[in-house]
Image: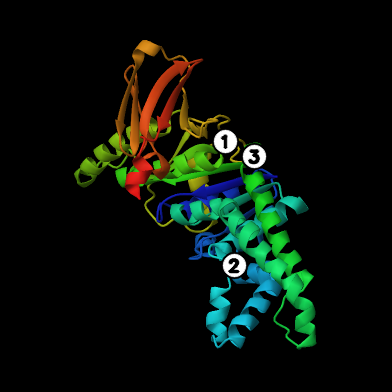
Amino acid sequence: MRVIVHTGKGGVGKTSISAATALRCAEMGLKTIVISTDTAHSLADSLEAKIGPEPVQLADNLWAQEVDARYSMDKYWGLFQKYMVALFSRNGVDDIVAEEVTILPGLEEGAHLLWINKYFNEGEFDVLIVDAAPTAETLRLLSLPDVTRWWFERVLSLTRGAAKLLRPIGRLVKNDNIPDEAAWEQVQELFKTLDRVRDLLADPEVASMRLVVNPEKMVIKETQRTYTYLNLYGYATDAILCNRIIPDEVTDPYFAMAKDRQKENLGLIGEAFGELPLLKAPLFGQEVTGMDALKKLADSLYGDQNPAEQMFAGKTHTIEQDEAGNYILLVPLPFAEKDDLDLYRSRDEITLRVGPYRRNIVLPYALWDLEIADAKFDESRLRIRFFEKRGEKQRAK
């Protein structure tokens, strides 16, 4: 099964593009499901169909679903949460408040990942299209398995050890607030599932991240940061989809300045994302909802291309750590010559010039206050090593 995740800044048209992509895959004979992980669901509006928390078939080879996080949480977190709610309630906390505070931060959103695991394991579909939440929420979602592992291994392990000691005492004093092994096993299986989904989404042979942008500078800059963080977490991006480009046939002078600005920003996309394929969709004269409009959007984006195919196999840059713990930014530059390279650094961004071409790379927060130790060009790639000044941490304290 192929998994394609569409994400981007809020309002750029992710839902329309997800629906159009799913429709095109279905038309090509691929059994396809499109799911929305955005809490503010609009997938049903885009498809002009009634869908809900369970998959609904809309056409030949096409299913859709708006994921219900609460349903997923009850399934995967329910036993342990019931114990926690009972414990808080017994100590004077209101039941409703107790239910809210017993969900691990981010886990409600993380319930969306559990459906990806389900569909991949069952193998019923050829393609899974994910209409993801805006970029900040998506990054929290994708980093969830890494972020929560510490919480699980430390806090829950300690609590579980205490429960083993207290459970026999609890039976004697008739205290039902100590979880049994089934609750702990449910929690453990939840985190194992999140780890499996993380590995699945990080496999470029299985999953692709696709970034949806509009030809606006602010949107492009935010999407650059998203791309850098996706690289940092090991998720492969294989295309940029630029939506709502004013068509050439629009000649009204009112749009002249906007068209010029969009042309400049399309050039900025090339600088920002290097070799990544750029797919374009025009600004339509009407709202893109319903099957006919979605087909037109799919035609503009893909033509005769199969959207489920992997569109780019490499990475335009990666961030690694060496044995000493220093961060290293690696930028493949095939066919470049050392004498053609120039490098400029601002706090949160590096600009590379290769002959007449320019490339901007937004740095993750962890690198903002680090200095460049050296930059070496070897074997068709630029290797930039960062280091922390001595005494920097002490002064920060």
- Specify the label residue 69 is tagged with: 2
- Looking at marks 2 and 3 on the same chain, the residue that comes earlier in the sequence is marked by 2
Q: Nearer the viewer, residue 228 or 55?
A: 228
Q: Where's residue 362, x and y in %?
A: 38, 38
Q: Where's residue 49, x and y in %?
A: 57, 65
Q: At 59% across and 85% down in the image, what residue appears?
A: 89
Amino acid type shown at disc 1: Asp
Marks 3/1: CA distance? Answer: 26 Å
CB atoms of marks 2 and 3 within 8 Å: no
Tell me which corner region of the image, top left, top right, bottom left or bottom right, holds residue 165. Answer: bottom right
| Image height of 325 relative to 340, above or below | below
Tell me which corner region of the image, top left, top right, bottom left or bottom right, holds residue 368. Answer: top left
Q: At 42% across and 33% down in the image, what residue appears?
A: 273
Can the viewer see residue 63? no
Q: Where's residue 184, x and y in %?
A: 73, 67
- Looking at marks 2 and 1 on the same chain, the residue that comes earlier in the sequence is marked by 2
Q: Nearer the viewer, residue 87 or 397?
A: 397
Circle 1 is placed at which residue position?
304
Marks 2/1: CA distance? Answer: 36 Å
- Specify the label residue 344 is tagged with: none
Q: Where's residue 247, x and y in %?
A: 34, 41
